[in-house]
Amino acid sequence: MVPVRKGSERLAKKNYLKIGQYTVLEIALLKAIKSKAFDKVIINTDDPELEEVASKYGVNFYLRSENLASSQATSDQVVLDFINHHEGDQFYWLNTVSPLQTISDIKNFVNISEENNWESGVTFNKSQVHLVYDNAPLNFQWENGFARTQDLKPVKCFNYAMMGWSRKIIAKLFDGKLFDEDTTLVESSKWSGYLLKNKDDLELITMLATVAPDQGIYL
């Protein structure tokens, strides 16, 4: 599924904005199609007008209820609703917030899910940086000299470019658990880590789109 909420807050109408010749939504749809990784591609939205977009690209359309379209709706509620209304054993969330994720990232994520028969999965980027949380170091110590960056234990930062769930996780979703300690973490390319959250992000991603590799489409 490619979820699209009509009323995004941080960047208004985010999924309707253009990067090059395509909207953010169209980029996600075209990559989902060109990856050939999915049996079915579905727009999951509260905007009935997007049914025309679904028809244009030959994908399916699901109009979710208004109570799942507010900023208070949680991702686990959206996923649970989608699984309850569709057939299949494996479900994937291809996120529009990561418009530069590569075709290889998408394929790799789906392949790993099938090989591991997982309950859930999410993409991440690895980084070797000195990390402090609430004034306490997480992957280094202040004592005995300042650790070299190359010696640090890498941290894993979720980018949410791709997420996935098996039908057997329904009970956990019902309890509000989108992910847990059994979730498979899948490393993706740095291109998946450029997230579209605000106007500055849009300007940067628009510039990078001209040089980003393995996009499957000409932006």
Image (spheres, helix red, strand yellow):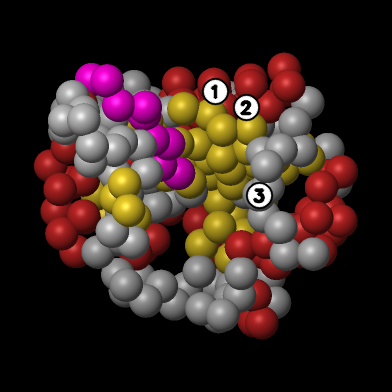
Query: Is residue 179 positioned above or below 48 on the image?
Result: above
Instruction: Indicate the quadrant where residue 100 lies.
Output: top left
Task: Look at label 3 and name its amino acid.
Answer: Phe
In terms of depth relative to the viewer, which is nearer, 215 or 79?
79
Kind of element beneath mark 2:
helix
Label at residue 179: 3
Task: First in sequence, mark 3 or 1: give its number.
Answer: 1
Neighbourhood count class around disc 1 (C-alpha, 10 Å): few under 14, some 14–19, many 20 upward = some
Q: Which residue sits at x=28%, y=58%?
A: 135
Tag nearer the camera, 3 or 1? 3
The numbered mark, 3 or 2, whose residue comes first in the sequence reads 2
- Judge by depth and name the residue closer to the eye, 111 or 121: 121
**The residue stretch that appears in magenta:** 150-158
Determine the secondary structure under disc 1: helix
Whether residue 76 appears in magenta in the rendering, the answer is no
Residue at the far front: name it.
144
Specify whether 47 is left or right of 214: right
Q: Which of the two marks, 3 or 2, is nearer to us in this view? A: 3
Reading the image, the residue beneath label 1 is 107
